[in-house]
Amino acid sequence: MMRRTSHKVFLISVLLSVTALVGFGTGNTNIASANTASASITPSLMSQVPYSALKTLPTSAYNERFSYGATPLKIVEVWHSQQAQTEFAKTAIIFVHGGCWLNAYDLSHAYGFYNALAQQGIGVFALEYRRAGDEGGGWPGSLDDVKQGISDVLARVNTDERYNKVYVVGHSAGGHLALLATQTFSKSAEDFKKLKGVIGLAAITDITRYAEGTNSCQSATTQFMNGTAQALPKAYQDATPTQMRNGVPVLLMHGDDDHIVPLHHASHFDEGKIVIAKGGHFDWLHPESASFHALLDVLKKRVTLENNNEYCIYPARIGRQRPIKSKDQ
């Protein structure tokens, strides 16, 4: 018998046609049955989406653009909900894009993702920030920008009656920065009262270990950090997300076949987790993927875990913990 741990792990299978219920957080709300709050995840949905496929997705012009600082890269592009009455009514995300922390990749590579969310009825505040290669970018400038940008958006949304639920969502390196930026936020603070959670999509959570890898994104870590972990141990420690202790729920969502950010990053610390079977790194940004539909489920109906429930498989049962494994472990 496997030893029980405190990890809360979800496994959504795309090998079979299943009905999935997903959620995150802590508290005493019961988990609803898969029949009462569901989204169908079927074999027809995509996995292992290539980066090039993101560029072919339908897009739409942003509705609004504003600055959150003096430099040209401190901007937010906004896609307001295109559906007034949906299951996502008055829901918005603040999105921190990825791209190995490098200025070769900007927020435009996820335009199709923003458009798809807006069509579903979700408002999108897409955050740009200085990255490695930009003056003032890299560590810690990129994080400073993301903190400033998220705080600015939350202050604006606080007085915007179109939205009453906001999630900070970050992908890959953007997930890393989103987790770090929100660690110091206080859920009880007036400006953060609409913040309901932080979601890391294939988020990098162990930057020291990530820097040891050899793929092109892993190799960019030292450029972002301005040196190696051996030379800058304190900086790498500061750049590693830790437990959220401020009452803001955190959810890590990861594909178990991600070749850019290995699955072990989803088990770096004890927060809610959803693992997508056969899920790849860029699946999250494609509206025809199982990963994207799992994200919609989370934003549609957040279900809080009971403290004693660590693990579930849909459509099966709450059960014993099964450890997360990835191909590089």
Image: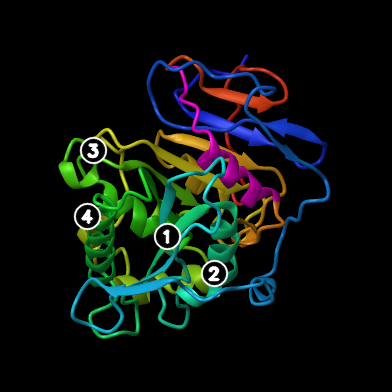
**Residue sitting nearer the eye, 90 or 11:** 90
Q: Quadrant of residue 110?
A: bottom right
Q: Sequence order check: which comes first, mark 2 or mark 4? A: 2
Residue denoted by label 2: 110
**The disc label shown at residue 187, or none:** 3
Question: Is 167 rendered above or below residue 316?
Answer: below
Q: CA distance from mark 3 to mark 4?
A: 13 Å
Q: Sequence order check: which comes first, mark 3 or mark 2? A: 2
The amino acid sitting under disc 1 is Phe
Q: Sequence order check: which comes first, mark 4 or mark 1? A: 1
Q: CA distance from mark 3 to mark 2?
A: 28 Å
Image colouring: rainbow
Residue 28: give x, y in percent of width and height. Answer: 40, 15
Q: Sequence order check: which comes first, mark 1 or mark 2? A: 1
Q: CA distance from mark 4 to mark 1?
A: 15 Å
Q: What segment is highlighted magenta in the picture? A: 290-306
Residue denoted by label 4: 155
**Residue sitting nearer the eye, 214 or 294:** 294
Residue 19: give x, y in percent of width and height. Answer: 73, 31
Question: Is 174 rendered above or below residue 267?
Answer: below
The amino acid sitting under disc 3 is Lys
The amino acid sitting under disc 4 is Ala
Q: Residues within 10 Å of mark 1 (few under 14, many from 20)?
A: many
Q: Residues within 10 Å of mark 3 (few under 14, many from 20)?
A: some
Residue denoted by label 1: 95
Q: Secondary structure at mark 4?
A: helix
